[in-house]
Amino acid sequence: MENLLTIIHVIACLGVIGLVLMQHGKGADMGAAFGSGSSGSLFGVSGSSNFLSRTTAIFVLVFFLTSIALAFIAGQKSGTESVVKATESSEAQKPSETKSGEAQSNSSSGAQNIPK
């Protein structure tokens, strides 16, 4: 399920990027007003803005829904333990393990037999 949502999420992301790049900004209308001649293109004068903006809105909706679903799935996997408490407990265990580990390595390596 997570893999399917990830694939849909990436497709929606690429769709939003492509559709936004295909749309023309408000500055492009100024060029058409001065005789550029490119205002009546593939979808007509105002047809492209309606079609592209609606399609972009659909892709954005799918993108947001998959983002929320993936965040929910990730939250369910991580469990209910606090990140701060997990960090504190792991740091509290490290010094005691390190001290006992050093004592064992010193006694086994013969470091105490070296004259000073």
Image (cartoon, rainbow, N blue to C red):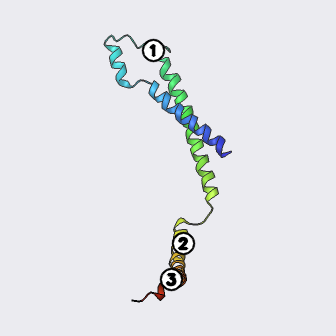
Marks 1 and 3 close (CB-CB < 8 Å): no
Quick one: quadrant of the N terminus? top right
Distance of label 1 from label 3 (alpha carbons): 83 Å
Residue 29 place in picture, x, y as percent: 36, 19
Please state which amino acid type lies under the numbered disc 1.
Val
Q: Which residue is mark 1?
A: 45
Q: Crowding at label 3, few (<14), some or many (≥20) Cα neighbours within 10 Å?
A: few
Residue 50 place in picture, x, y as percent: 51, 23
Q: Which residue is mark 3?
A: 106
Total numbered labels placed on residues in the image: 3
Residue furthest to the right: 1
Q: Reading the chain from its start, which is encountered first: label 1 or label 3? A: 1
Q: Crowding at label 2, few (<14), some or many (≥20) Cα neighbours within 10 Å?
A: few
**Left or right of 19 on screen, residue 65:** right
Q: Nearer the viewer, mark 1 or mark 2?
A: 2
Please state which amino acid type lies under the numbered disc 2.
Ser
Secondary structure of the residue carrying tag 1 is loop
Instruction: Identify which residue, 97 or 86, lies in the foreground.
Output: 97
Q: Crowding at label 1, few (<14), some or many (≥20) Cα neighbours within 10 Å?
A: few
The disc placed on residue 93 is none
Q: Which residue shows up at 51% across the image and 32% down it?
A: 16
Distance of label 2 from label 3 (alpha carbons): 24 Å
Distance of label 1 from label 2 (alpha carbons): 64 Å
Q: Which residue shows up at 54% across the image and 27% down it?
A: 54
**Left or right of 99 on screen, residue 115:** left
Please state which amino acid type lies under the numbered disc 3.
Asn
The disc placed on residue 90 is 2
Q: Reading the chain from its start, which is encountered first: label 1 or label 2? A: 1
Residue 111 place in picture, x, y as percent: 48, 84
Quick one: quadrant of the C terminus? bottom left
